Amino acid sequence: MTRRAFHSLMAGVALDRPAAAAPTLRPALQSLLLDWCDGLVGLQIDQPSNPAEHGAFRCPACNSLHGRCADAVYPLLTAAGLTRSARYQQAAIRVMQWTRNVDAPDGSWTNETDPTSWKGTTVFGSLAQAWALERHGDLLESSVRQAWGRRLRRAGEFIRKTFDIAYGNINYPLTATHALFLLGRMLDEPEWQARARELARQSLGYFTEPSRLLFGEGHPEDRISPLGCRPVDLGYNVEESLPALLDYSWMASDEQVRAAVRRSLRAHLAFMLPDGGWDNSWGTRSFKWTYWGSRTSDGALSAYLSLSGKEPGFYTAAERHLTLLRRCTAGGLLYGGPHLAARGAQPCVHHTFTHAKVLADALDAGLPPSPVDPTPLPRESADGIHFFPEIATWLAARGPWMATVTRNDWLYQPGVWHPTGGAISMLYHRAVGPLLAGSMARYRRVEAHNMQPSPDEEDYPLTPRVDRMVGEREFSTLYDLSANVRAQDQGGAIRFDVEGELCDSSGARGGGRVAMSYRIAADSTEISVAAPEGSSFALPLIALPTETLHPIAGDTIAIARSGGTVRVHASGPLGLRDDGRARVFNLVPGFLAAPLVIEITDARPVTCTIQAG
């Protein structure tokens, strides 16, 4: 390593970005970071005689060792710098030693201990190690710094040679813009920096019109669906791709790219809910959606904080999101959704060691803070209908109600069904929070090593829907890719009319026609359904076990929740599903729900009215 390169390993990055955590957020950021780092240290395997496991974290949910454990090196060293505690420093060194188990001859790290597994995640590990060296190298002995620097050079060369704009999903080449520019600066490799600029400029062709959403989370990345949809995933965009591209733009002084990212971060913020949750119910990779983001990406906090002095509402977004992350943390670990702990499910450690990096990044920025911004989130101040044609999805707001309706027909893989068919994939009330949230039609571990097993044997979708059995075949609106949706703002209320088909899990028709309408007014949300006799309308209403259902009559129930009482009134008998279970659970996005059902016994429409407050 040259003297110049070594010197850059010890240089700070405080001048890269013009904003950092505001004073009111810094204590909360630091508290959560140290809590998570304590959780990681508690899970770390300390068995020097067993090099296959020594230094890794045993995952409570998956009962395995995740290949990206060493992403924790950066937050652990940040914690060591904050506290001057040797135990964080030692934990960081141990987890880096363990990476020998995922070393590949070409300079990459594999995603799992299987040497044939995916290597693209090298880009995330290299960033974590680079941040650790550049920002906290003074906590390491010279021999350790030199060894890590040599290993980092091999990883950087792998990224330079392997990544192009079509490598993997779009999150990989866009993260590579940050990694290659940072590593090129640290290791005196101008060719790497030039490659970063090239990828960044190519990325400008991956923003949709007119909404400025980032696309490319699916293959082929340029495919447009029959309904005109692009492969867009909110979780990966706001938690990985856009933050990385923004960091590149600060380092490279690339104003054109930064302007594009700012517009896109602003566009994506339309999907943040008032409690800091991300509504990715419609995303192409929503199989990894957890209410606070995506399961194995890094997080959106530092990106929104770094622009919070320039973009109204960005500080509010960071503050609300940080509060949600704290609420989903127990025992020092980030759970994959608000209700996992209440369900008794174990947390996947992957969530903690990836998202801890962004907390560390926000704390390490070290520049004068942004002023506190009282601007509400876009969804809080919205009224009316906002249509996103690139994802065939509508956001609606009236009074305290916020709803998402989608017919997005871009599927990540055949058989991987996100909400579609004109479903209400999110219903949120300002006083009581989320009431409905769409899930996968069937929970499939599309990325088996990156998605924890379900704690339940049975898989119960949380998407409101019509189901029907015809002989031995099961039909549902969950599988309808060609539903027609008409949206109208009628002044006093917003109305959606949906015409669709009951399809089986292959997408084949045969269950009959369905008509649904949603009426969203200031005092209630009403859902009407007309479907063939023998169908049923499933309304999984988000509710903890402690939130007791009180039958008021055969057609009405009430639930007392924090913030108010929820009442559901139906035009016919309203009950739980046949087995009488009071709650069902789904890992996407991590909620328990009361599985309310209305049987359709004749040709007359059934109506369900939800009130809250």
Image (spheres, rainbow, N blue to C red):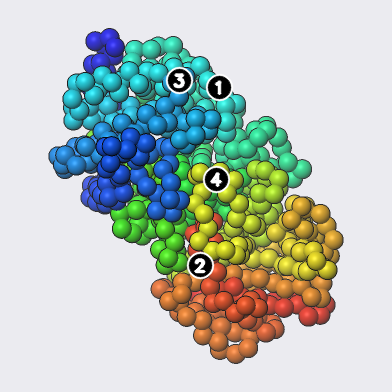
Which residue does the image show at 64% across and 66% down from the upper left? Answer: 464
Please identify the residue farthest to the front as the structure is shown: 49
- In the rendered structure, are the residues bearing label 3 and label 2 in contact, judged by CB atoms less than 8 Å apart? no
Disc 4 and disc 3: Cα gap in Å? 24 Å
Q: Nearer the viewer, residue 85 or 29?
A: 85
What label sits on residue 105 in the rendered view? 3
Callout 2, which amino acid? Leu
Q: Is residue 282 left or right of residue 332?
A: right
Q: Secondary structure at mark 3?
A: loop
Q: Is residue 521 left or right of residue 101?
A: right
Q: Mark 4 or mark 1: which is in front?
A: 4
Q: Nearer the viewer, residue 343 or 566?
A: 343
Residue 384 in view here: no
- Characterize the local packing of mark 4: few (<14), some (14-19) or many (20 or more) Cα atoms within 10 angstroms: few
Q: Earlier in the sequence, mark 3 or mark 2?
A: 3
- In the rendered structure, are the residues bearing label 1 and label 3 in contact, judged by CB atoms less than 8 Å apart? no
Residue to which mark 2 is pinned: 592
Q: Nearer the viewer, residue 205 or 29?
A: 29
